[in-house]
Image: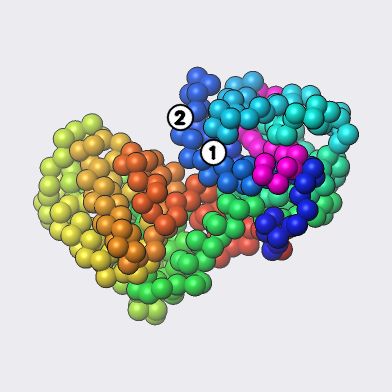
């Protein structure tokens, strides 16, 4: 996979740059700019090379129809302020655009094409659509790892028609994930949360052969506790999980990977309640398990202390209520402390995990924080990502 840094002559070249600027919007305002911050290096790199930059991205799922609420305009305006450079948003139908008319004004260096998912050809991975997009540029750069699990026209098929390169952020993401999948410093620990164990079973099974410790927290842990015959009250759990959990424990024995789950918990009667610490045996029928307890926190901190690599995906509790955020905060603080003395390599990912780390203003205190969501999980599971395969 060639990186755009390896290309010598980028001066005055039209660069078709695929980014993931699918940021959360509320009333037209960006509520989390993490994804925008991460693409600044490639923008600044191409500006310094005097390239002509054509940005392709999407917001939401307009399903091939124009939706003004899903316009890239707010992102365009935010990025303009961030880099202090004029950016032109083109609303014209992509099929009416041609290369020689894109940068008629010599002052233009960056243009945005409107939401690429306004065209149903994008998600169909349409060859003609890809070919037309390719005709607007000299080179293609994918710096959207988080879209690379999608076989879409601007991610996948387009590489058939243009010299294609990985961007700076995409390369950084893959290098970080390699450090928790193939180039590993051991002992290595995975802390995994979320509500559904069935959605993470592929991830857990693929990591167990490589990891020393897998710590299961959050709503997923309720399934383990229930499996072990512990009372979980009215806490969320999935039905018919016995076979999945059998697989987890059988695989862990085969590869000598230790599986950990809560030893004590914080409960509430509802999501807005105050927290009450309980031993597992004391959980009653009307209790909701909403966080891990102090014994579990201390055990996890001890495991982190002995680890050289840690992967974190999913909070330990219902952190939206501060009364049940302590477990997640303590995990984060333990990782951050180890990071400060450079004795651990830390990767975190997943929307809720990022939201929690953002609340602590601690994104820079981890070695790598992935905004990739589905692509992050699929890569960790060992699946082949269409966008990465296309670049190879």
Query: Mark 2 near mark 1, Cβ–Cβ under 8 Å?
Result: no
Q: Which residue is mark 2?
A: 31
- Image position of 4 (left or right of 373): right
Q: Quadrant of the N terminus?
A: bottom right
| Of 1 and 198, the residue lying toward us | 1
Residue at image point 59% right, 62% down: 383
Q: Earlier in the sequence, mark 2 or mark 1?
A: 2
| Relative to 287, 236 lies left or right | right
Tell us which disc is closer to us: 2 or 1: 1
Q: Which mark is residue 36?
A: 1
Q: Is residue 61 above or below residue 256?
A: above
Q: Does the rendering let one see residue 221?
A: no
Q: Is residue 61 magenta?
A: yes
Q: How many marks?
A: 2
- Residue drawn at x 17%, y 52% as measured from the top left: 293
Q: Main secondary structure of the magenta part?
A: loop
Residue at 50% across / 61% down in the picture?
176
In what quadrant of the picture does the C terminus appear? bottom right
175 relative position to 99: left or right: left
Q: Nearer the viewer, residue 149 or 201?
A: 149
Percent position of residue 160, x then y: 82, 54
Secondary structure beneath label 1? helix
Q: Which residues are magenta?
A: 47-67
Q: Position of residue 308 (x, y in %)?
A: 35, 69
Residue 263 within the segment the image draws in magenta? no
Q: Marks 2 and 1, how far apart in space?
A: 11 Å
């Amino acid at each position: 996979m060639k990186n755009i840094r390896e290309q010598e002559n980028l001066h005055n070249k039209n660069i078709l740059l695929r980014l993931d600027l699918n940021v959360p919007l509320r009333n037209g305002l960006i509520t989390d700019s993490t994804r925008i911050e991460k693409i600044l290096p490639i923008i600044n790199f191409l500006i310094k090379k005097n390239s002509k930059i054509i940005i392709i991205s999407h917001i939401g799922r307009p399903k091939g129809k124009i939706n003004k609420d899903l316009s890239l305009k707010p992102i365009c305006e935010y990025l303009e302020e961030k880099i202090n450079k004029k950016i032109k948003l083109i609303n014209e139908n992509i099929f009416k655009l041609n290369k020689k008319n894109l940068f008629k004004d010599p002052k233009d260096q960056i243009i945005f094409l409107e939401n690429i998912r306004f065209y149903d050809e994008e998600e169909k991975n349409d060859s003609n659509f890809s070919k037309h997009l390719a005709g607007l540029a000299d080179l293609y750069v994918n710096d959207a790892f988080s879209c690379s699990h999608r076989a879409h026209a601007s991610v996948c098929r387009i590489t058939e028609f243009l010299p294609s390169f990985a961007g700076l952020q995409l390369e950084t993401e893959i290098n970080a994930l390699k450090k928790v999948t193939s180039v590993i410093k051991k002992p290595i620990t995975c802390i995994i949360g979320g509500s559904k164990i069935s959605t993470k079973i592929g991830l857990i099974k693929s990591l167990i052969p490589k990891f020393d410790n897998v710590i299961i927290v959050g709503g997923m842990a309720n399934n383990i506790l229930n499996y072990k015959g512990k009372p979980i009250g009215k806490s969320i759990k999935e039905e018919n999980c016995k076979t999945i959990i059998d697989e987890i424990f059988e695989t862990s024995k085969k590869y000598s990977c230790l599986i950990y789950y809560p030893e004590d918990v914080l409960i509430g009667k509802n999501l807005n309640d105050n927290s009450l610490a309980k031993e597992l045996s004391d959980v009653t029928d009307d209790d909701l398990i909403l966080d891990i307890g102090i014994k579990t926190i201390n055990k996890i901190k001890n495991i982190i202390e002995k680890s050289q690599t840690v992967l974190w995906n999913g909070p330990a509790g219902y952190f939206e209520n501060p009364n049940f955020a302590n477990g997640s905060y303590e995990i984060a603080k333990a990782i951050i402390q180890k990071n400060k003395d450079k004795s651990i390599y830390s990767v975190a990912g997943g929307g809720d995990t990022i939201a929690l780390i953002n609340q602590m203003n601690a994104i820079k205190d981890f070695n790598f924080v992935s905004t990739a969501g589905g692509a992050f999980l699929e890569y960790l599971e060992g699946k082949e990502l269409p966008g990465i395969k296309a670049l190879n």
